[in-house]
Each structure stands twice: as structure tokens, then as C-alpha cells.
Image: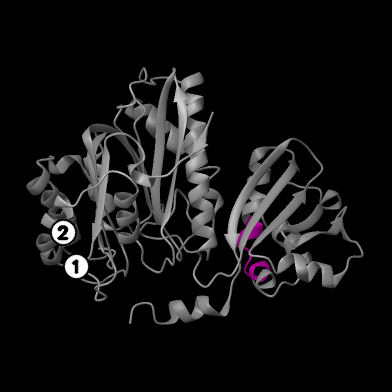
């Protein structure tokens, strides 16, 4: 049985975290350097952005995870360390700072950065702050909260999730933190996601699990259609729960996957709801597709539609934009079978049946679409395939935020 719990990245046994302001960001009230540490060396895996322009930390992390193990994560905000001539040197330097204070080999450190692209990054602030960062490592909710705050950029809220589950009679936990508000259109994961678990699982099965999971979690999320240069999802599994190690697909692996999906989907919702300038979370649920791939394509296309996102901002039940988005998604559907409903805490309104509009109250639709979370329910009437995608509306503030993001 899966149960949500508190503690975020520190919910699992044997993990501590911290976040401080070291001086990368000008605002001294904003934390800008995070550290996550396992008591012991852990199985590790990651997935990365598909953008051809990749931040230096991704290149370094790929090398460090080549053997499938790691013990710590260090991440700065305020600077992406991307397109810098000395980027690799800086990223490697960050991992050596962890080694200097915690005696964890630099090759066992996952490195990440987020913020402005193409700006020089200096190690000096991190060198000055690494002592405070390491000495302040904490287990429990406070450590997770500090780390979650330290990886934020334009985020307005910290993003954490954790759950407990049972594998082989042993109680296990998965927890995580994430950052992401803009430049969100992942083709692997999202801006930055760090996960930890005390379940025992082999590196190969861990990689398999996150690679499968993102197809129905972070792949199904979009804020603005831009794929970041620094997207990364990483996970550490230290095995301290004491379960028999998961080394193949079976009941234990399926239990792990279900718990993993519970955490990642919770983080997806949080990221989409906190999209830059967003006023509403949009959850698009497609059912009745011929297969899962068709459902995924249709759902993702709808939440990515700029016109539809604008309609949701204005609480306008312009359902034609839903069909338009499905139509150019290349999903093989029979347009004459499409049904569309909008639902929220404000009620439910049916707007389309069999690919054609039906009479509905504009006042009722306005009430439904004025809520903070909108469900777009699409029936394709062709089979058992279903999928869910997460997005947000597009407001005036998105342009304001990104008009002067660098300056």
C-alpha cells in the first residue's frame, strides 16, 4: 500500500540535505547552493535533456554515473553553467568541493546547475560556502526544504513529495524535490528533479525504472514548449530499507515503479501549477484511444497548444482549440468520435460530442473554467488507451517574467 508522507528528499533512511545562500545570487534572502548526501554509496541513475546544447554539469554527471553509483548531489541556482569555456572545470570543481568536506570521492558526486545560460560562473562563492553547507546537513523535512529552496529560480513555491511502500515485507520510501517553472517542455524529464530511496535495487533496474516512468510523468508535462539545456532527473538508492535487492522485473519491481510514479506525478503537478505566470493547472485526461501512444500524443498536444492555454487563462470554453490540437498531433483518431468535457470544483460542462459542438451554458462554462485546476476530459471512443498530461494557462505575466529574465 502506497502512502504519501513528509520529508521530501530526506524522507528515505540515510539521507541528509541542506541549502544555503553562498553568493551566486545577488538576493541574500534566496538560497542558491544545495547538497544531498547518502550515508553510504548508492545505486544511481539519471536521464537528461535531449537538447543538443547541454550544460557542463550534465556532461560531468554522465561521466560520474558511468559505473552506476554515487553518494551525493550538489546543485547551484542562479547560473546554468552552460555555454561557458571553463564549464567542465567549474562542474568538476563543485564535485571536488564535496570531496574536500565529506571525503566522498568526486567521482561519486552528481553535479547540477540552473539559472541564466551563457553567464560566467565562479567557484569562489561555493568555496566560501561549502563548509557551512556540509556542516548544516540535516535529516528530515527541514533539510529537504532548504535544499528545495536552494534549487529554485523563477519558481514561486518549493516542490517536494515522498511516499512509503512495501517491497518483500520491508517498508521502503521514495522522496524527491524538483524545480521548474519556465523553459519546461521536457523530452526526458524536467528542469531539475532529484529523487532518493532506501529501497535496494540494482543500477540497471533503477535506470530502467526511471526511463519507463518519465514516459507517463515528465514527458507528459509542458509549460511553454521550450526544452532546457540543463534538464536532469537523478535518483540515488542506498538500500538501507533492507529489502532483497531488486535485480529483475517482477512483483517487487512493479511495487517500486508504482511508488516512483506516485512521487514523480506529484512533482509534475506541482511544476505545471507553478508555471511562469500561470493562474491555473490544466490536467488533460484522454481515454478511449486505440492505444497508449495515441492517448499520450493527443493529451500532450492539447496542453501544449498556445491558443488553448490562452483560452483557459480567459476562462473561455473554446473547445474547438482542443480538437484542433488533437488534429495536428498526428495521433490516428476518428474525429467524429471525439467527446470533450471541462470539469473543476466549479462543476462540469459537456461541450462536444461526436466531434461536433453541443449546446451549453456559457455562464456555467465560465464558472467551471474560473477554478485553479481545470480537468479537460477527452474521449476518443476507439479502445482502452488512456493518458494524462499536465500543463498550465498562458497569462500576461509569462511575457513580463521572460522579457527581462537575464537583466
Q: What's the magenta bit mostly, secondary-structure-wise?
A: helix
Instruction: Please give the count of numbered marks on the rendered protein.
Output: 2
In the image, residue 48 lies at what x, y percent?
A: 37, 48
Between 148 and 211, which is closer to the camera in this rendering? 148
Mark 1 closeness class: few <14, some 14–19, many ≥20 residues within 10 Å: some
Q: Give the residue at mark 2.
A: 90
Q: Quadrant of residue 80?
A: bottom left
In this image, 27 relative to 141: left or right? Answer: left
Where the C terminus falls, by quadrant?
bottom left
Q: Quadrant of residue 372?
A: bottom right
Q: Name the secondary structure under disc 1.
A: loop
Mark 2 closeness class: few <14, some 14–19, many ≥20 residues within 10 Å: many
Q: Is residue 331 in view from this perspective?
A: no
Identity of the residue drawn at 44% across and 81% down:
403
Q: Are marks 1 and 2 in contact (CB under 8 Å)?
A: yes
Q: Quadrant of residue 153?
A: bottom left
In the image, residue 94 lies at what x, y percent?
A: 16, 54
Q: Is residue 142 above or below residue 263?
A: below
Q: Give the residue at mark 1.
A: 121
Amino acid at each position: 500500500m502506497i502512502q504519501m508522507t513528509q520529508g521530501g528528499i530526506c524522507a528515505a533512511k540515510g539521507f541528509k540535505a541542506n541549502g544555503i545562500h553562498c553568493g551566486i545570487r545577488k538576493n541574500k534572502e534566496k538560497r542558491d547552493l544545495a547538497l544531498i548526501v547518502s550515508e553510504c554509496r548508492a545505486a544511481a541513475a539519471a536521464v537528461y535533456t535531449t537538447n543538443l546544447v547541454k550544460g557542463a554539469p550534465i556532461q560531468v554527471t554522465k561521466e560520474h554515473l558511468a559505473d552506476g553509483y554515487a553518494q551525493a548531489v550538489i546543485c547551484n541556482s542562479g547560473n546554468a553553467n552552460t555555454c561557458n569555456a571553463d564549464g567542465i572545470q567549474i562542474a568538476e570543481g563543485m564535485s571536488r568541493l564535496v570531496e574536500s568536506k565529506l571525503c566522498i570521492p568526486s567521482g561519486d558526486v552528481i553535479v547540477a546547475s540552473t539559472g541564466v545560460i551563457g553567464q560566467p560562473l565562479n567557484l569562489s562563492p561555493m568555496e566560501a560556502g561549502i563548509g557551512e553547507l556540509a556542516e548544516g546537513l540535516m535529516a528530515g523535512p527541514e533539510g529537504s526544504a532548504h535544499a528545495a529552496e536552494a534549487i529554485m529560480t523563477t519558481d514561486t513555491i518549493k516542490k517536494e513529495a515522498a511516499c512509503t511502500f512495501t517491497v518483500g515485507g520491508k517498508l521502503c520510501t521514495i522522496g524527491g524535490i524538483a524545480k521548474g517553472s519556465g523553459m519546461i517542455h521536457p523530452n526526458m524529464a524536467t528542469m531539475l528533479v532529484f529523487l532518493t530511496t532506501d529501497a535496494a535495487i540494482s543500477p540497471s533496474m533503477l535506470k530502467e525504472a526511471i526511463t519507463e516512468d518519465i514516459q507517463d510523468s515528465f514527458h507528459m508535462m509542458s509549460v511553454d514548449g521550450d526544452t532546457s539545456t540543463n534538464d536532469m532527473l537523478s535518483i540515488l538508492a542506498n538500500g538501507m530499507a533492507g529489502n532483497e535487492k531488486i535485480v529483475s522485473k517482477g512483483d517487487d519491481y512493479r511495487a517500486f515503479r508504482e511508488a516512483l510514479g506516485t512521487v514523480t506525478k506529484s512533482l509534475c503537478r506541482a511544476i505545471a501549477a507553478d508555471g511562469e505566470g500561470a493562474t491555473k493547472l490544466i490536467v488533460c485526461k484522454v481515454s478511449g484511444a486505440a492505444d497508449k501512444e495515441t492517448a499520450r500524443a493527443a493529451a500532450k498536444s492539447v496542453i501544449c497548444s498556445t491558443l488553448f492555454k490562452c483560452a483557459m487563462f480567459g476562462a473561455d470554453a473554446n473547445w474547438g482549440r482542443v480538437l484542433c490540437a488533437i488534429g495536428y498531433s498526428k495521433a490516428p483518431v476518428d474525429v467524429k468520435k471525439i467527446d470533450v468535457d471541462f470539469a473543476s470544483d466549479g462543476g462540469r460542462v459537456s461541450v462536444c460530442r461526436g466531434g461536433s459542438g453541443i449546446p451549453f451554458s456559457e455562464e456555467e462554462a465560465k464558472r467551471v473554467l474560473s477554478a485553479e485546476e481545470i480537468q479537460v476530459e477527452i474521449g476518443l471512443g476507439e479502445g482502452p488507451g488512456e493518458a494524462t498530461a499536465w500543463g498550465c494557462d498562458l497569462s500576461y505575466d509569462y511575457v513580463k517574467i521572460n522579457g527581462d529574465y537575464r537583466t
